[in-house]
Image (cartoon, coloured by chain):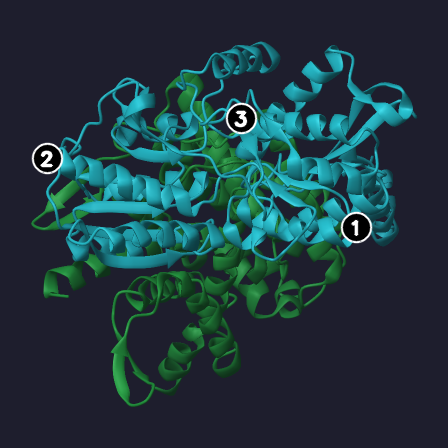
Chain colours: A cyan, B green
Amino acid sequence: MRGTLSFVGKHIRHITMIALAFGGIVTLCTGSSRAITADDTINIGVVMPTTGSESKAGGYQKEGIELAIKQINDAGGIMVKSKGKKLKINEIFYDDGSDSKKSASLAERAMSSDNVVAVLGGYSTALGTAESVMADRYKTPWITTGAGATAIFGKGYQYAFGTLSPVALIGTTSAEFLGSLIDQGKLKKGLKVAIVVENTDHGVDYVQGFTEWANKHAGYFQVVINEKFELNATDFSGVLQKVKNSHADIFLSDAHLPDYITMHRQYLQNGLHHQMVSYGARGPENAARQALGAGTDYIFSGIWWSNKLPYPQAKKFATDYKAFTGHDVDSWYSAPAYDGMRILAQAIEAAGSLDKTAIRDALKKAQLKDSVLPGQVLKFGANGQTEYPFVITQNKPDNKVDIVFPKDAATGEPVAPAPGK
Amino acid sequence: MDAVEYLDLLLKSLLLASVYSAMAVGMTVIYGVMKIVNLAHAGFLMLGAYFALELFQRFHVDPILGSVLALPVFFLFGMAVHWLLVRWLPKSDTPTLASLLLMFGFLLVLQNIAYLVWGNEDQSILTPRTLSSVQIGQISIPKVNLVVFAAAVICMIILQVVFHRSWFGRSMRALIQNPYAAQIVGVDDQRTARLTFGLGTAFAGFAGGLLGMLFSFSPDFGRPFLLRSFVIIVLGGLESVSGVALGAIMLALLETFGINVPLPVYWHGWSFRYLPPSYQQVIPFSLLVVVLLILPKGLSSLFNRKWKAA
């Protein structure tokens, strides 16, 4: 044993180099997971974070896409006229590790050397923004199912599409919801609002949406703080102190899941309380409710999808998802991804070939009429981004969640102001 | 801001400093004795958090006790890592590329093992203490932060006593000051290095358990803390345990007050402006550059020089 170790010690540099080379080969081999491709399959690239800080949401999106692929393949595949037969989908999956540089390079690899006809990917805004530049460069349709920032779609890209409604609409819908509570007499006019958002396009859009509504409806709100914080921060005590000193009535944040959990934990620990609290599109996630227990009760969120939506196709999706993954669809992430894959399949069929430009043209015209998303129809606007209404949900005690806005989709009454400690 | 709000900020800074010093101290002792920049420190922090979580979930062990139990377990783990990997590194007075690569590779191994065992879910330790706070007048102090503060202070005191009152501590200090002279006078450098690596890992595991009470965590946990640990070590002096406390306090004060106290700015005339919270991370790195330029041996060297002069 001693001799062996001594050998290792003497040759540590060689062993390290061999280990690194081996590691590199393993990394290259595992950067994507792919099945052996054949002529009778359609290669679709999926770039998502299944490791790193965005892994949870990325994992949910991957599951949504894979459920759609399974359903399409089980039904025989996609009819491609030019081939004269139905072709099955072959998913080539890439884990970007929540790293924007890796995300961009994997999207590039999928489009340039892995022979995919389209790429689905880009959760979150930061990763989606990094990937978005590749679509037009390689003239390959790219659908982001997890980035809703308008900045991505304001650059005139012709091959970029998105299944998330613009983030600005979360801010607008949140303002509209709070405005409706004022109109109902549940809250008083002239509410002081503290806004603290992540320093990304996502956060900027949220603030823009909220302030646009507030400016159009004078007298409803007075924004007393409007601050930004860095993604994946470890400490929010400084910014929360500012919120405390502002003596605001409403606390609005726009944060990703890990920041939402950390910030709200510190919010509660610091004894803060506001009449209404929101973290943008976050709120009902199981991870947060497990981490903070009853501390997340009465938080409201503007989300792209809820399993409480009354549509039959949304209910069926929730049932199929549970059967496929073994767990409930407890958040919105998987639904836009599921519909992203379905509208892509519809566009490929409409294009009648695997020509990428033909698929892009078909995507521009596509309408998914049995969409599981709010509004029930998914289609892309002139800039490539879809636009459908948001629903506002509110966490209730005992892990219950209700849609509380708009009224015609509501499954429960909003509780406002949120009860104190 | 009034006096109470300043006091509130000061208390929050001290509580934050205790978290920072707990996470940085293990890295400091390893660097001091072995000149290894332990990039795997983030992995040890992460494993410490999962260790406390497993004890809490499976055996209902309080996470504070879990963190204390991490000390002996991670001490042995650290010694094993040293025996298996670290001791084969070529000896050097300065950090080597081989040591950086080895520790970075080991961090990746630890992270991937954690992904295999616990998956990519965000985990948290929720106890009745987690969300409760002590109210003193208008100031609210989170109970869990108080516990972390007490634990970190006790650990720093114990480490300081070990450093100055034990044979092992004297050996460590001798190796830090002059490794060649230390060996001439009979210090067993391999044995001391093994024990030091164990000690550094033990403190990382302990700090990980404490951090697990404050934050949600996943296998990727620890990286943001790693960067701050670097800053603290450089601020406090690369080879000083008491300097870690000093560096941590300074960093926490600047981070907290930096965005809450208006600073004089000259822009078309003098005015007072707040630093936006999104620039909070600029503070530690700016400080790092300034200290490296002016006091490359850290803030403690300034005091040492004054004491020596006196």
Label placed on residue B15: none
Q: Is residue A248 above or below residue A386?
A: below
Chain ID, mark 3: A
Residue A404 percent coordinates (x, y): 28, 26
Q: Residue sitting at 69 percent across and 57 percent down?
A: B100
Q: Is residue B68 above or below residue A69?
A: below
Instruction: State the CA–CA distance, disc 3 to disc 1.
Output: 27 Å
**Same-subunit check for callouts 2 and 1:** yes
Instruction: State the CA–CA distance, disc 2 to disc 1.
Output: 54 Å
Label placed on residue A185: 2
Q: Residue sitting at 65 percent across and 36 percent down?
A: A365
Secondary structure, mark 3, is helix
Q: Give neighbour class at mark 1: few <14, some 14-19, many 20+ (Cα, 10 Å).
A: some
Residue A274 percent coordinates (x, y): 18, 42
Between disc 3 and disc 2, whose residue precedes? 2
Q: Report the quarter where the C terminus of chain A lies.
A: top left
